[in-house]
Amino acid sequence: MNDMLKKLLILRTPGIGPVAYGKLQSEYGADENIVEHLSMSSDFIDSVKREMDRAYDMGIEYISDCDSRYPVELKNIKNHPIVISVRGNIETLNKKCVSIVGTRHSTAAGMNFISEIANAFANHNFAVVSGMAMGTDAAAHRGALSGNGNAQTIAVLAGGVDYIWPLENESLYYEILDRGVVISEMPVGMEPIASNFVQRNRWVAGISETLIVGEADAKSGSMATARFAIDYEKRIFAVPGHPSDARSIGPNSLIKSGVAHMCTSIKDFFGEEKEVKNEKNNKNENEILDKIGMIPVSESVLANLVKKSISEIKSELVVLELQGLIRKQDGGYVLN
């Protein structure tokens, strides 16, 4: 029986996680003694072997906290995962990391900003860590993947490392495998359940030196991640937003309480860099988007701001609506 099988037999036993594993080690010493003490059935042992066979067939590796490839920052967290499963470019795990989290229902402007921040970190040889959810997470991963070279991003999953969730991010999952890495502490093949997302958030906070919080509701997984980062004494940045938008309550509260630095551009991290903005093909679209925020702005006000007639901007507003960048609200336009 090899060493990894022994560890997985212990960790796959119901009720045993990092804390219980540590107590068993203190009492019984070596893993083989723990396995013997737990008196496992042959059916259970066979099920764990089948998991390992499946992992092998899919190119998934198991890395224990004794392995030099195990992420250093994560290992320093109390009760960290004893074993993680890894799929993709394992060398990504040894890079300096920055974690980026935020709401699944982010605005177009919010996702663009997060993408730019992630891209800058990737180009400075950081691995960008997030949870592969829709919205902010996806923007962070894609921003990193648009950077130079490989090994730019780490997706921490709440289910098995082979279980793609949400399905809308299937293409993103495979892009990450090509140029980054996907990790999980859950058994290969396991479907994510609600309680696992809390653990996922812990590791997203723990694996990096810095956490950046984008748009986030007050009672959200992103704010839970921030609380873990506070406990771990990580450096925290938050992207401020308009106080009337519920998605700004989370980051604004972190800034107001003094636990987070304000994040307004890539200059907050790389002072020598010039801030890069995504250039739109249509200059007028840039002008209009620059004037639209979370408070509804009427056509007449927009026309006055960009020094054009209402008839001139109507077609441009229609295009922006069709692109999903803006929407009508209360007689005006807001960012989507």
Image (spheres, helix red, strand yellow):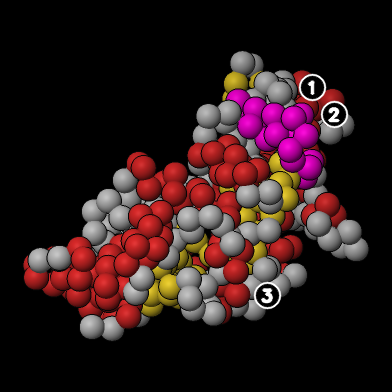
- Mark 1–mark 2 contact, CB under 8 Å? yes
Please identify the residue farthest to the top as the structure is shown.
330
Q: Position of residue 44 (x, y in %)?
A: 14, 65
Residue indicated by mark 1: 301
Front position among marks 3 and 2: 3
**Which amino acid lies under the numbered mark 2 shown in the image of this protein?**
Leu
Q: Which residues are magenta?
A: 246-263
| Residue 262 appearing in the image | yes
- In which quarter of the view is residue 247 placed? top right
* Separation of marks 3 and 2 at Cα, in angstroms: 38 Å
Please identify the residue farthest to the bottom as the structure is shown.
2
Q: Position of residue 10 (x, y in %)?
A: 28, 65
**Residue shown at 46%/51% (left/top)?**
200
Residue indicated by mark 2: 305
**Which amino acid lies under the numbered mark 3 shown in the image of this protein?**
Asn
Dot 1, crowdedness within 10 Å: few (<14), some or many (≥20)? few
> Element under label 3?
loop
Residue indicated by mark 3: 148
**Residue shown at 35%/55% (left/top)?**
20
**In the displayed structure, would residue 69 be above or below residue 183?**
below
Q: Is residue 87 left or right of residue 54?
A: right
Q: Position of residue 139 (x, y in %)?
A: 58, 53
Chief secondary structure of the magenta span? Answer: helix
> Element under label 1?
helix
**Which amino acid lies under the numbered mark 1 shown in the image of this protein?**
Val
Dot 2, crowdedness within 10 Å: few (<14), some or many (≥20)? few
- Mark 3–mark 2 contact, CB under 8 Å? no
Sequence-wise, the earlier of marks 3 and 1 is 3
**In the displayed structure, would residue 157 be above or below residue 242?**
below
> Element under label 2?
helix
**Residue shown at 71%/46% (left/top)?**
236
